[in-house]
Amino acid sequence: MSESLRVVIVDDELLARQVLREYCGQLEDVDVIAECANGFEAVKVIAEQKPDLVLLDVQMPKLDGFEVVDLIGRSVPVIFVTAHDEFAVRAFDVHAVDYLLKPTSLERLQEALTRVRGRLSRTDEPPVPPQLLDDVRAQRGPLERVLIRDGTKVHVIPVGEIDFIQAQDDYVSFHAGGKEYLKEQPLAEVEESLDQKRFVRIHRSFVLNIERLARVEPLTRDSRIAILKDGRRLPLSRSGFQRLSALL
C-alpha cells in the first residue's frame, strides 16, 4: 500500500468540509490532518503542518483560494473544490492539480488524487502556455492588494498604500506606510499585475506609485532623480523618465 497523503481541507462551509472528510475517510491512503474555515487559518496551518495536498475552496471571506495559493507557493499541490466553474481557467495559472465542482463525487475525488500522486512522483512540470497566462491575467484585472507571508502571519497591503517597490535579488521589497515587506517574486511579475496608469517602472530596480511623486530633479547632466512627497529619492533611468513623462 502506498504512503498516505496528508491532506488539509479548507472551506468556509462546515457541510462542505464534512463531505470531503467523509470521502477521504473512505480511502485507506488519505489522512486528513486539519480542517480550516478561512484563508488566514489555512496559511498558518499549511506552514506549520506541511501537508502533501490541500483541498481548497475558491470563494471564502478574508482570503480567497487564489490568495492562499499565492501565499503558500507551489510546493504544496492544490485541488480546488468549488461551486463556481468560472475560475477553472485561472486555476491553470497557479498550477492547480485539479478543479472539482461541487457537489463532487468520491470517484471524481479519487481521480484527482491519482493525479496528485503522479505529480508528487515527478519533478518536471509541464509549462502553462504563455497565451493562457496572458488571457488569465487580462481577465483578472489590476491587483488590488498585496499579500505577504511572514512565517505564519499574513500582511495584507492595499495597493493604494504602496509608495514604491524595489527589486532585491530574488525578492521585491514593498515600501508602504514607512515599513518594508519582502516577498519572493520577480519585479517584472509584480509590475505586470499592477494598474499601469498608476504604477510605472522608473528604473530597472524600482516601480513607483506616481501619486507619491513630488517632483523630478536633475542629478547630473544626463541623469535625473525622482523626489517623493516624503523626501525619499529614487533613481530615474532615461527610459524610466520617458515612461513617467507619458503618464504625467
Image (cartoon, rainbow, N blue to C red):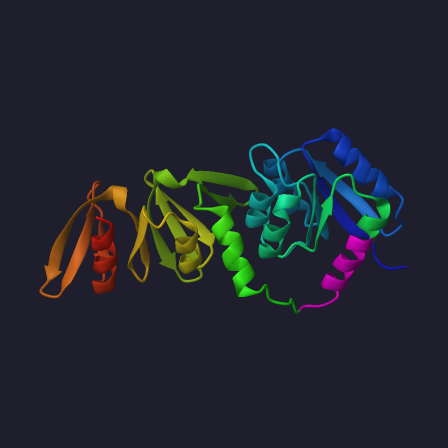
Q: Nearer the viewer, residue 6 or 142?
A: 142
Q: Is residue 85 above or below residue 97?
A: above
Q: Residue at x 25, y 57 (%)?
A: 243
Indicate the position of residue 65 as horizontal and vertical percent values. Answer: 61, 42
Q: Residue at x 53, y 53 (%)?
A: 136
Horizontal side of residue 244 vs 3, given as left or right: left
Q: Residue at x 34, y 38 (%)?
A: 177
Horizontal side of residue 137 vs 248, given as left or right: right
Indicate the position of residue 165 as horizontal and vertical percent values. Answer: 35, 51
Q: Is residue 112 magenta?
A: yes
| Residue at the outermost left position | 221
Q: Nearer the viewer, residue 239 or 118?
A: 239
Q: State the image quarter where residue 219 is shown.
A: bottom left
Q: Residue at x 77, y 49 (%)?
A: 6
Which residues are the magenta region?
111-123
Q: Nearer the viewer, residue 34 or 134?
A: 134
